[in-house]
Amino acid sequence: MTNITELGVAAIRDGVASGEFTAREAAEAFNANVAAAGQLNAFIVATPEKALEAADKVDADRAAGKPLGKMAGVPIGMKDLFASKGVQTTAASHILEGFTPEYESTVSQKLWDAGAGMLGKLNLDQFAMGSSNETSYFGNVISPWRRNDGGNAALAPGGSSGGSSAAVAARLCPAATGTDTGGSIRQPAAFTGISGIKPTYGRCSRWGIVAFASSLDQAGPMARDVTDCAIMLESMAGFDPKDSTSLDMPVPEWSKALDANLKGKKVGIPREYRMDGTDEEILKSWDDGIAWLKDAGAEVVDVSLPHTKYALPTYYIVAPAEASSNLARYDGVRYGLRELPDGANLQDMYAATRAAGFGDEVKRRILIGTYVLSAGFYDAYYTQAQKVRTLIARDFENAWAQCDVILAPTTPTAAFPLGDKVDDPLAMYLNDVFSVPASLAGLPAMSVPAAINSDGLPLGLQIIGKAFDEQGVLNAGLAIEQRAGFSAKPEKWW
């Protein structure tokens, strides 16, 4: 029989539906891989019983002749930012350690309703703040990839969805949920040779997802290929009255409309993205991507996004400001960690709880956010950043008059060794330089694997689309996927 763990979402779903194998066999195979991969530290909590329970229901439904959902029989990983009823949900932070929600996030519930099962809760950067998965209270996630020079330095799987990217790349799950605030789906996908899409802001409900920056956070799928991302996104997206920013519009069947023929489409190449310091092999893969899209029938045009250089500083004002507000709820009173020193008053308890519960990066961003929102600095920083954000969105609007999608690198470098940038926050933040603009504008954007560099590590290309045009993004991603012929996977060492 086929090795089930080498199959993706579509193949597992179709295999279960046709009776080639059972959903339980799929769940058992992936449960075994999860249990054997402790060295990667991709999961905070494994839930093999949840995967089997969902699988048995699918098998029973199939036997009874009942219709099966779009994700029927597919076991997935759930980023530990999504509330899971009865299962610890921590956002990888000590301050939420032991917190067990009494409710399910909208996105995860939609996936369970579609027939998916949960293999466990995936590790991430604490409160989704980080680009390397080194800020988790539960330890670093290790990328399954290694350089081919014989060195065995542990590499970053990207962040914040590093547990998701590592688990999919290492065949611990065929797909996983991610969240993307400034690149946290796309950057880890690029680092680990998988695909991931951040949909238009509002496509997926934020209800039940631990908040970082509410005007930026957006859930999305991470999987081996474009088709699997499309199938999973169909199950995740949809209007939710519990989320005031949710889009009240129908969810297209993106997977059925996938088409790699780009005849009549225009692809914009933003001149401002050719930045100093970008790896030469990244630039070569970008040139290859341009040639592939031309081969798919697209016309390539130069576009300008003049405010790109302000995107990173704008993001690192807006996102921490919103985090400062969102994280004020963690005070040791209602749930999570409570530190109560002897003789302490309420104020002392707040201070002790937050000092012990939040990691250094989270504290850094709360401090920055509180500063830019404080009297005397609000107008100088936060108001200005919001104005620049509007200009960045306007740049994209102007570009859409000339093109249908934009092609750019996903990251300025390939995966770097853990520890390389942890002492230099600015160097770490620069990892998001290509991914942040689309987040600030709320646009759909996807990373697809494009090449293997001279170190044997994957490189990703990014497609950015118009608001609500996930189909255009997925189609361009499929055109690249078919021409790149990327089939590399990490050699097992764990």
Image: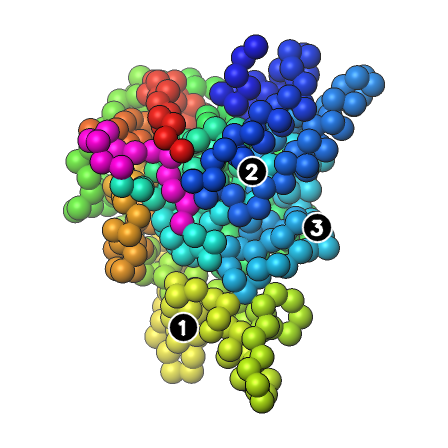
Name which residue lies at 19% across and 39% down.
279
Q: Secondary structure at mark 3?
A: loop
Question: Type of residue at label 3?
Answer: Gly
Q: Which residue is mark 1?
A: 367
| Residue 65 visible somewhere in the drawing | yes
Q: Position of residue 110 (x, y in %)?
A: 68, 39
Query: Label 1 near label 3: C-beta < 8 Å?
Result: no
Residue extent of the magenta highlight = 140-152
Quadrant for residue 362, please give it. Answer: bottom left
Question: Type of residue at label 2?
Answer: Gly
For residue 72, side relative to residue 355 (left or right): right
Q: Which residue is mark 3?
A: 86
Front residue of 442 and 342:
342
| Residue 387 visible somewhere in the drawing | no
Query: Label 2 near label 1: C-beta < 8 Å?
Result: no
Name which residue lies at 55% across and 19% down.
4
Crowdedness near tag 1: few (<14), some (14–19) or many (≥20) residues, C-alpha within 10 Å = some
Quadrant for residue 242, please give it. Answer: bottom right
Front residue of 153 and 177:
153
